[in-house]
């Protein structure tokens, strides 16, 4: 369940001079308060969502909001609203989200660079996650057993599973074929470009 909604936070309060209370008629007892409204998710403020002016009488306790404010108080309330800005913390959630996305993008780029490096300079023990084509949802593994110049010898895993990260489940020696076959770096690059080779892992690192 996602818990979200609007919260308010008090920002400032000023006396409404010269405006008598519409209920008890006491002069100079009205004050106007500006509250900031913000959207939250799980109580983390995400972004500001406007401001609300409330007029209240310190004498009789009357409280009026927005358009219900006395005519004479409307302009002062509007000015005060304009002069009051919402604190930056009302953007906290967006900040966290942006930081998270930035981190994921940096981590993703780092991972892609590492994979490109593994593919360009293969080591025995490297494991390629592969599938029949870029639409297939069944994945299997190829393990590099030897590197000879621009060619690697791989053994194919004899299982495939419906999981794009099959490493944990399939990577045990008994599950691989005993018969290696060669693949050139060019072929591997084509498989990667076609979405057949989806991941390169170097388990000892
Ligand atoms: Zn009053």
Image (cartoon, helix red, strand yellow):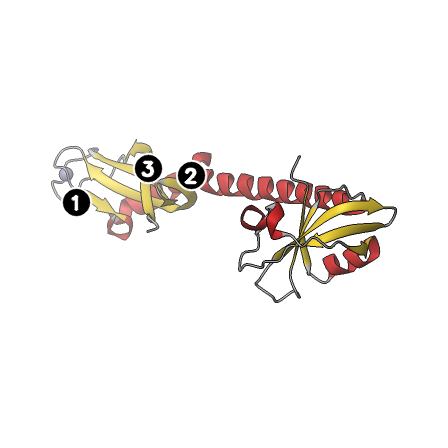
Q: Which residue is rendered at x = 29% and y = 37% of the image?
A: 33
The residue wearing badge 3 is 9
The residue wearing badge 2 is 90
Q: Which residue is rendered at x = 64% and y = 44% of the image?
A: 108
User: Measured from the top left, where is residue 93 in percent x and y?
Assistant: 45, 41
Foreground mark, 1 or 3?
A: 3
User: Measured from the top left, where is residue 165 in percent x and y?
Assistant: 57, 51
Q: How many marks do you count on the picture?
A: 3
The answer to whether residue 31 is above or below residue 157 is above
Give the position of the C terminus as an image quadrant: top right
- Determine contact: label 2, label 3, CB under 8 Å: yes
Closest to the observer, 24 or 84: 84
The residue wearing badge 1 is 22
Report, in whole angstroms, how far the alpha carbon at label 2 lies from the one at label 3: 9 Å
User: Measured from the top left, where is residue 50 in percent x and y?
Assistant: 39, 47
Report, in whole angstroms, how far the alpha carbon at label 1 lies from the one at label 3: 26 Å
- Determine contact: label 1, label 3, CB under 8 Å: no
In the picture, measured across the screen, residue 149 lies left or right of residue 35, that is: right
Earlier sequence position, callout 2 versus callout 3: 3
């Amino acid at each position: 369940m996602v818990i979200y909604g609007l919260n308010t936070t008090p920002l400032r309060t000023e006396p409404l001079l010269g405006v008598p209370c519409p209920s008890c008629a006491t002069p100079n007892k009205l004050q106007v308060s500006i509250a900031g409204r913000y959207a939250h998710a799980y109580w983390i403020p995400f972004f500001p969502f406007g401001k609300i002016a409330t007029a209240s009488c310190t004498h009789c306790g009357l409280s009026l909001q927005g358009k219900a404010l006395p005519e004479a108080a409307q302009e002062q309330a509007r000015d005060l609203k304009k002069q009051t800005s919402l604190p930056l913390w009302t953007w906290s959630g967006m900040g966290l989200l942006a930081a998270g996305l930035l981190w994921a993008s940096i981590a993703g780029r780092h991972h892609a660079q590492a994979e490109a490096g593994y593919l360009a300079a293969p080591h025995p023990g490297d494991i390629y996650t592969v599938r029949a084509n870029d639409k297939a949802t069944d994945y299997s593994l190829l393990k590099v057993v030897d590197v000879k110049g621009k060619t690697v010898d791989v053994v194919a895993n004899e299982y495939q599973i419906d999981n794009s990260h099959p490493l944990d489940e399939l990577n045990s020696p008994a599950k691989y074929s005993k018969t290696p076959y060669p693949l050139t770096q060019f072929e591997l690059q084509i498989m990667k470009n076609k979405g057949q080779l989806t991941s390169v892992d170097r388990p000892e690192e």
